[in-house]
Amino acid sequence: MSAPAKNPSLIVGIDLGTTHTVVAWAERDAGPGAIRVFSIPQLVTATEVEARPLLPSLLYAPLPGEAPADPFGDAPFAIGEHARRRGGEVPGRLIASAKSWLCHPAVDRTAPVLPWGAAEDAASLPRVSPLDASARILAHVRRTWDDAFPDRPLAAQEVVLTVPASFDQVARELTVEAARRAGLSARLLEEPQAAFYDFMRLAGAEGLDALLARSGGDATVLVCDVGGGTTDLSLIRVARAAEGQPVEVSRVAVGHHLLLGGDNMDLALAHLSEPRLVGGAGEKLDPARFGQLVLACRAAKERLLGGGDAPAPPEDAPVTVLSHGARLVGGALTTRLGREEVEAIVLDGFFPAAPRDARPQRGRSGLVAFGLPYERDVAITRHVAWFFARHAPEARGPTALLLNGGVFRARRVAERLAQVIERWGGPRLDVLPHADPDLAVARGAVAYGLALAGRGVRIEGGAARGYYVGLEPLAGGGPRPAVCVVPRGAKEGSVHAAAGRTFALVVGRPVRFDLFASDDARADRAGDLVPLEEDRFEALPPVAVAFDAGDAARAAAGKRAEVRVQIEGELTAIGTLDLACVEVGVPAPRRFRLAFQLREDGRGARAADAEGGARAADAEGGARAADAEGRAPGGAAEPAQGGAAAERAPARPHAAATQGGRRLEEAREAIERVFGKGRPDVAPREVKNLVRELERVLGERATWTTEAARALFDTLAPSARSRRRSADHERVFWSLAGYCLRPGFGDAGDPARVAAIAPLFAERLAFPQEARSWQQFWIAWRRIAGGLDEPLQVAIRDLADPFLAPAEQRLKKPKGVKPEALDDLLELCASLERVPAGRRSELGAWILERTWTDRDARLWAAIGRIGARVPAYASVHHVVSPAAAERWLDHLLREKWQELPSAAPAAVQLARRTGDRARDVSDRIRGEVERRLAKAGAPEAWVRAVREVVAVEEAERAAFFGEGLPVGLRLVSE
């Protein structure tokens, strides 16, 4: 979408909220008092349009035959008030909380996963990604604005888009991308800062002077912004400036990301109401109708808590969920919520008393629904206490409190939080006035834009977090070191270089760096080496760099070349983080931008030595870091090309230490000898024994490091055509290729490797009469399944299904294809997690039919993989429906488990509790599985995984791939 040339005459603030979207604006040369709110036109019924200051951040997909007006080009969705109303009436067709999904690491946020929990067979239901849902809301804002101001199109104005202060860099980049897709170029601003800008706008110079007078000349303001999806905490310092200057305002700290807000309160009320609606013990609403219940509870909560200028709230309010059929009286389920019980849940559950030294509880379960990983401890007051203690350890409490968010419209809620903080024993708390919290953030965004133009006080502060690149672990153990690349507090537009830390990168291979963030109040500088202590650092998605075609061509020609770089970082003017590798020691240095790896490919895998010796960068393509003195962290210097020394700690001898250098070159030469240009002196036995020869040189296959395995694959892949020389060549090729590339992700170069080998699937085998070759062919694709995208996984199923389906399906088999080793083909298909859930359910049903006559334990192992509640590598939106998993469990519970070693593990995979109503099987089935596991003497960890929400262990994920992962590759749960 082409945007008009920028010649802004207006400043426009957009609060893209979880619950509502609000737009405010002002002339660039206006004062803060001239800020106005743009009433956003929207459908309020199927045919009526009305302009309102609040646009519900909701998308509704009309039913087939429903034909609402579409004056804004929002089809196939309706956006705004009509979406809110219809979404409460029709289950399963509403997209809500898109903003919360933008920061959910366990799903592919660019994949069409919403509405969450939609039925597998809902073919007519349009689906979108969290990114596109946000972009559609912003596009609606743009279109309605342009209609209202045709001479001042929104894309030509200075747009400030607000985000939670706790949003990490990935969520911020996704927000910027959503704006770009809507045709907007936006600057980001943290929402608590925006709320404080609005306070300053309303208070004026006199109000700020009064604040300082009440605080003794130096005020510490705690901003608590409880929105629909997040609780956002910030500390802001207000102090008197030098003579003749206005006050100085700076943001001191921001809190961790807390997916905790009004949505959680609505969920708590829904859980309270559900038993009253369904009656029977253990009965639950399906995910779509539970979503209706949550919306109904939200409406009741807002009526009962009241606040502001609203009339006195009623004593109770109805909560109604429409029925699917006419079997219920009136076609609906109805109960009532009382004001006192709503206040009790909100006040005692979310704002309980909490001393200053309180810490959030780390329980195993919490309010979870719709696939979102809500905060375990819902007590907002404990999170506030922990935040303040971490960032103001010398103070007993703040001097002032600014509240923002719709929940604080309720007077008793605002009073409760103030009382909790006052009991910490700090100075007298000054609760600052907060005008309409629904509008404050958008208006504050405009005030920020005016401050940038010199028309108001600007909040200083710079980067809220420091950013660090992880290095290799120390030889003697202890925390892994990291180098600071952007210090906390870095100013916008200031470039920081990790001085004294030079990385030597092998060209022709993408290189990945593990990135960490910390909001700890420490004074690290760019280049400082610090220990990665778990409670102070947060792992971010890795960043990667790719080199230009010239470097890659030289590498492909066998010319090993290195580029020596430093890492530079900058907090950009629009509020995102820009990292790059910049060449050093050359007249015209090149700059290679480090890009976040946002898609699901590779998500959940990090390189780390299983024994603590290898480092991430080694496994990610040949990165070596050197300090200025040529001294490794462990104390020993190691020469690097060009005179630098690598930061490589000496470790005790093990496989990773012996698989580089001469031994690796010898192994590569062995591969070249068999698969390189035709060699008349290569005997058939030498082909058959190639893997054995590689083990002689490098050690047993299980000890091969990720770096060594990928190096062998990179030697083998260019000679793929040579696999057709003989049946042995073909069998060994697939055996070695699959093993060296397993599990298909984890290394920055793996997407390119998978892309290079993917076309070979369509060529299948040159010697199709060889059963052992078919076996290795299927095993190879199973081993790398985690790196295969959805189209290729579907193509594999298209080929396989005619050979796996029951005969009565009458699926047409492709001509000329007569595959062997069908059991291995079945295991491959069971491992394809990115195939649409409906087709995976279909495969599970076919296998289930075989279990009636075939006692092969591998069949139930395959069903367990297909129906697992937590995928091993794919986004969670690929999980098959709970209804399918329950059908399979019904059969499994009737089996004799003592005769099936795969029965108990399969039951755990199928019945594992996730806390997500759209994935979990019923309590009844889960209880039966729990009892059966206990009777069978299953490990307690298995029983607990069915009973409670517990993290998936690394060993469980690795077991999915059927063999050990390469040394240096560790699967983690995000």
Image: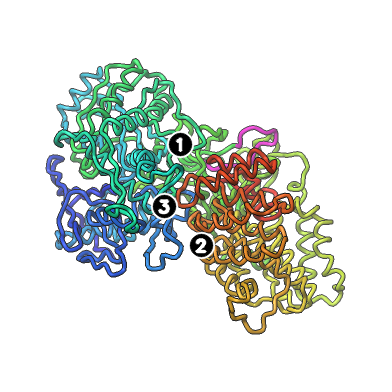
- Nearer the observer: mark 2 or 3; the answer is 3
Which residue does the image show at 37% across and 65% down from the upper left? 125
Mark 3 vs mark 1: which is more N-terminal? 3
Depth check: give the residue in front, 49 or 452: 49
Q: Are marks 3 and 1 in contact (CB under 8 Å)?
A: no
The stretch of residues the image draws in magenta is 468-480
Using the image, determine if residue 747 lies above or below residue 540.
below
Is 478 one of the magenta-colored residues?
Answer: yes
User: Which residue sits at x=69%, y=43%?
Assistant: 936
Residue 100 position (above or below residue 694): above
Report if the CB atoms under discs 2 and 3 are less than 8 Å apart: no
Q: Which residue is tagged 2? A: 837
145 relative position to 872: left or right: left
In the visual, does 461 lie left or right of 836? left
| Mark 2 or mark 3, earlier in chain | 3
* Front residue (pair 679, 280): 280
Of residues 951 and 719, which is closer to you in this image? 951
From the image, tell me which residue sits under label 1.
376
Which quadrant would the N terminus be assigned to in this image? bottom left
Q: CA distance from mark 1 to mark 2?
A: 29 Å
How far across and how far down the image is residue 27, in percent?
Answer: 14, 49
Residue at image mark 3: 286
Q: Sequence order check: which comes first, mark 1 or mark 2?
A: 1
708 to 949, vertically: above or below: below
Label 1 packing within 10 angstroms: few (<14), some (14-19), many (20+)? some
CA distance for labels 2 and 3: 18 Å
| Residue 552 seen | no
Amino acid tagged 2: Ala
